[in-house]
């Protein structure tokens, strides 16, 4: 938990020198971004529990149509993927990606003893814990710990939000959350903050105050770095004015810059559709669909789509049977999208959910989500997945 | 810095929520022992219990007396929805009400201790009747006996529902409560086995609750077979299990260490803790006695314990209100800060409570904390938008923005229509000469020295007159990293 003293002095002296010696720091960045190649992961969190059964629809499954007299989506309306599966009608751009071999789907992903509380289940997904353990750091935060040990600013993982998710909070390092590079820059470049940082001597004992100064220094230099990078090659592509549109636009601009960011985290929601699900899910999917098109176009135009992988997840899926309010209640296992120009396996990667074998009306997970994390950490980000996840999981072969 | 003043402020911050504006002049004079005595005395009165549940909701719940546990089967879907919706609003009211109590109550130790237990016995049910009853149990026993507290909490509807004990039945045990009871509430990880979990879960079968939140033992669901737990064999009941856990000295050590970390220092002095724990155990778990031992000790005032704790968002916010009297036009603004900073009362991250310490601080939360004093003083807007809480929203409107839908799409609106009552604050400095003002404010607000010298601060201080000067120094110093510490 505690930062080694020598490392910390090294850290804080580097951080302070950012303000005075930007050129020196520039050189340093070059070296830190070398390891692990240039692959980028974009995590798309569908908050609130997206209804997976109405996302990748089991079009030949009678149980699905029987249990959902109101909400089921007729086979003809879905976007056909294969004999078994159709995509939600609003996800036309994902269908195109599918047809071009740039979208893979994993079904029945979850974890044993699933929890149906949003917060708890999200915690489990974000910390990569088992359902009976409580971790205080996130899987991408621990990735950051490994990547940014001794570096001056934790820009390897960035979240598009005003608040940092637990997923990006490590044992030693914490990622940076921002909605807009310019706004973060303006807030953090308060001359008072800079003066405060300059005054603080480096040779301080390792205590709570040092920790606060470390975070402050990382924020000020990180915000400056992110803002400068965001101006290098800003995209001119038109994105929808939705929140997800703006966030993907920011990410696209940063990806095409020289920034050392390896993981971007972005959320969309709320998918908590207890009531009136059809309209709500449709709206959210349309927003996603409209935003993802220019994003992929940008990546392709910059020849980066082979290096970028987007992974979607939700804290749980929903109950197989619909409820009486035109909605669905909290469920368990769910599907995940994997989108990239660099996939080795395409299409629907495993069996569709088995609706005849349920536990308390919910799907039984067939694949631990931590296997997906391990695969991405190891094969995509070239990180030590065992160290980050604390256990060895069997890799998948989609990359 | 006046050492006596620093000690008194240390006491105020740790045994309470910081020094109040109306007692600033006492800080350098009063003896810490005398101050602790007065805080303790104020905290020994029986607290006024909260009752914020909507009358219609209570009526609806009471009418359904003979209901089966937990599930609310006699209620129509609209009624369940209404309970849920009304609960979310009432829990917000309860939250604001408790913050108010923390701010103004002289029973500072009682409220601080209750905040500790609120994180220790962490539960989230989104049911106002359950959540409020648990808080009332906590506030009634916060400084009492840990045995009473543990027994009473274990029988609250909030805990029984949150840890699934309504589903814990003979032949189909649900181990959630038994496991967390040991891992988090009593002896801690590493001091029990999986067999202990299984056996004690059987002992708690039949412990349930009804819709009204009363404890309800269901003999037909109780497994009255022979169980073995920590070397004792017999037809053990849930009460027996709690009793056996309290017989373990490790329970006293576990609780004492956690209290030490919360009230004294995250870095534990094991020697001190083991002495305190032994005394706590021998006293039969007298919490009040334990707290007296801590706050009357000399080591409590060691420099290594002063100004080293990162304030939790609630301590930070309430502490600011105590030092800088405010008139809030919309007290629900506080809930937005709770959310943005990661500590929403009645909504702990999980049953382990808030991890605290360094976990409170990341770049977003630190930047926000450092800006809020200025935002409040200028009635400015806050640009950050909190994340959704789907457990509370239930796919509906965000409750914090409930009465002002305009705020949902436009987070840049003025949220803090708050008036600082500067006169009440400034009068504390009436006897201080101009050259001494900066130091006086610094020493009042900060428990850790801010490294910038007054001369370097001049460009950030409004020197137009004495009042403006006091105001601007105060706001600046509250926006420093050091102000996050106590």
Image: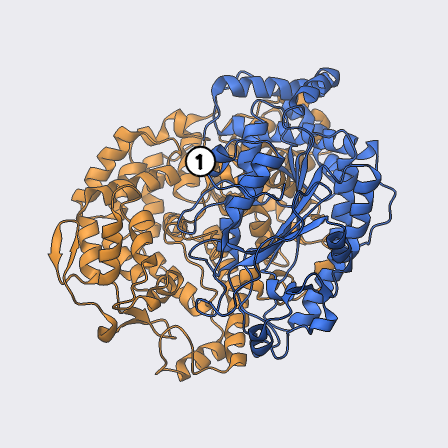
Q: Quadrant of residue B467?
A: top right
Query: Badge 1 is on which residue?
Result: B9
Q: Is residue B218 above or below residue A339?
A: below
Seen at 39% across and 60% down, the residue is: B135
The chain letter corresponding to orange is B
Seen at 60% across and 65% down, the residue is: A53
Q: Is residue B312 above or below residue B148?
A: above
Q: Tell me if residue B193 can be seen.
A: yes
Q: Is residue B355 left or right of residue B453?
A: left
Q: Is residue B28 above or below residue B128?
A: above
Q: Is residue B260 left or right of residue A235?
A: left
> What kind of element bears circle 1?
helix
- How far across and down, in percent of the image, does residue B153 sit? 31, 59
> How is colour applied across the structure in the image?
by chain
Quarter of the picture containing the C terminus of chain A is top right
- How far across and down, in percent of the image, does residue B320 sit? 55, 44
Seen at 40% across and 31% down, the residue is: B7
Seen at 72% across and 68% down, the residue is: A78
Q: Quadrant of residue A155?
A: top right
Q: Is residue A95 above or below residue B315?
A: below
Front residue of A129 and B379:
A129
The hue used for chain A is blue
Front residue of A3 and A258:
A258
């Amino acid at each position: 938990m505690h930062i080694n003293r020598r490392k910390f002095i090294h850290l804080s002296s580097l951080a302070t020198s950012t303000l005075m010696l930007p050129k020196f720091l520039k050189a340093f960045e070059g070296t830190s971004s070398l390891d692990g190649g240039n692959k980028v992961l974009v995590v798309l969190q569908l908050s609130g529990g997206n209804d997976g059964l109405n996302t990748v629809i089991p079009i030949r499954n009678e149980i699905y149509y029987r249990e959902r007299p109101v909400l089921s989506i007729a086979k003809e309306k879905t976007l056909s993927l294969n004999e078994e599966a159709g995509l939600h009608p609003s996800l036309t751009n994902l269908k195109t990606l599918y047809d071009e071999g740039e979208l893979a789907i994993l079904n029945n992903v979850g974890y044993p003893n699933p929890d149906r509380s949003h917060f708890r289940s999200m915690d489990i997904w974000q910390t990569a814990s088992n359902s009976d353990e409580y971790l205080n750091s996130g899987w991408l935060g621990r990735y950051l710990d490994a990547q940014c040990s001794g570096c001056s600013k934790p820009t390897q993982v960035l979240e598009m939000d005003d608040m940092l998710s637990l997923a990006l909070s490590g044992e030693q390092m914490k990622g940076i959350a921002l909605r807009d590079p310019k706004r973060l820059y303006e807030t953090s470049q308060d001359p008072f903050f800079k003066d405060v940082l300059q005054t603080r001597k480096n040779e301080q004992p390792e205590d709570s105050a040092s920790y606060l100064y470390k975070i402050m220094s990382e924020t000020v230099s990180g915000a400056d770095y992110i803002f400068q990078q965001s101006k290098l090659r800003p995209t001119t592509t038109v994105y929808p004015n939705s929140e997800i549109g703006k966030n993907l636009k920011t990410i696209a601009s940063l990806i095409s810059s020289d920034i050392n960011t390896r993981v971007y985290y972005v959320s969309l929601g709320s998918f908590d559709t207890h009531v009136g699900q059809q309209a709500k899910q449709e709206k959210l999917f349309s927003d996603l669909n409209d935003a993802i098109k220019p994003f992929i176009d940008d990546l392709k135009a910059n020849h980066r789509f082979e290096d970028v992988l987007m992974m979607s997840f939700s804290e749980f899926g929903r109950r197989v049977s619909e409820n009486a309010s035109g909605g669905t209640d909290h469920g368990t296992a769910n599907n995940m999208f994997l989108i990239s120009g660099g996939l080795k396996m395409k299409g629907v990667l495993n069996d569709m959910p088995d609706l005849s074998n349920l536990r308390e009306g919910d799907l039984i997970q067939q694949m631990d989500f931590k296997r997906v994390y391990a695969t991405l950490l190891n094969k995509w980000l070239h990180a030590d997945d065992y160290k980050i996840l604390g256990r060895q999981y069997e890799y998948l072969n989609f990359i | 810095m006046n050492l006596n003043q620093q000690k008194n402020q240390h006491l105020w911050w740790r045994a309470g929520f910081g020094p109040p504006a109306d007692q600033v002049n006492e800080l350098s004079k009063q003896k810490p022992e005398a101050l602790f005595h007065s805080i303790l005395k104020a905290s020994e009165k029986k607290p006024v219990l909260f009752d914020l549940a909507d009358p219609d909701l209570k009526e609806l719940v009471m009418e359904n007396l003979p209901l089966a546990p937990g599930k609310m089967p006699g209620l129509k879907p609209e009624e369940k929805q209404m309970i849920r919706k009304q609960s979310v609003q009432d829990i917000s009211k309860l939250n604001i009400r408790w913050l108010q109590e923390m701010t103004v109550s002289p029973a500072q130790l009682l409220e601080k201790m209750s905040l500790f237990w609120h994180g220790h016995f962490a539960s989230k049910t989104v049911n106002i009747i359950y959540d409020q009853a648990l808080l009332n149990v906590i506030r009634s026993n916060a400084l009492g006996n840990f045995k009473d507290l543990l027994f009473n909490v274990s029988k609250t509807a909030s805990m029984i529902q949150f840890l699934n004990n309504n589903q814990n039945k003979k032949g189909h045990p649900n181990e959630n409560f038994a496991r967390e009871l040991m891992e988090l509430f009593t002896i801690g990880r590493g001091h029990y086995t999986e067999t202990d979990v299984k056996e004690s879960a059987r002992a708690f079968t039949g412990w349930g609750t009804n819709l009204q939140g009363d404890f309800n033992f269901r003999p037909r669901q109780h497994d009255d077979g022979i169980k073995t737990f920590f070397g004792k064999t017999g037809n053990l009941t849930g009460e027996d299990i709690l009793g056996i856990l309290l017989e373990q000295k490790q329970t006293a050590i576990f609780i004492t260490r956690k209290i030490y970390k919360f009230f004294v220092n995250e870095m534990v002095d094991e020697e001190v803790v083991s002495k305190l724990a032994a005394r706590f155990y021998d006293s039969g778990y007298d919490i009040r006695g334990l707290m007296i031992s801590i706050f009357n000790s000399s080591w409590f005032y060691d420099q290594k314990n002063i100004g080293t704790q990162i304030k939790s968002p609630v301590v930070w916010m309430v502490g600011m209100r105590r030092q800088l009297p405010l008139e809030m036009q919309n007290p629900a603004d506080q809930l937005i800060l709770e959310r943005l900073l990661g500590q929403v009362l009645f909504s702990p991250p999980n049953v382990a409570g808030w991890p605290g310490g360094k976990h409170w601080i990341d770049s977003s939360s630190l930047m926000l904390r450092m800006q809020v004093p200025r935002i409040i003083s200028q009635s400015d807007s806050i640009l950050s938008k909190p994340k959704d809480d789907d457990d509370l929203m239930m796919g509906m409107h965000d409750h914090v923005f409930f009465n002002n839908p305009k705020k949902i799409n436009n987070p840049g609106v003025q949220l803090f229509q708050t008036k600082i009552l500067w006169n009440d604050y400034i009068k504390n400095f009436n006897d201080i000469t101009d050259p001494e003002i900066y130091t006086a404010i610094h020493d009042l607000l900060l428990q850790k020295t801010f490294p910038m010298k007054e001369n370097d601060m001049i460009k950030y201080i409004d020197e137009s007159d004495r009042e403006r000067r006091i105001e601007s120094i105060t706001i600046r110093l509250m926006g420093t990293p050091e102000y996050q510490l106590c």
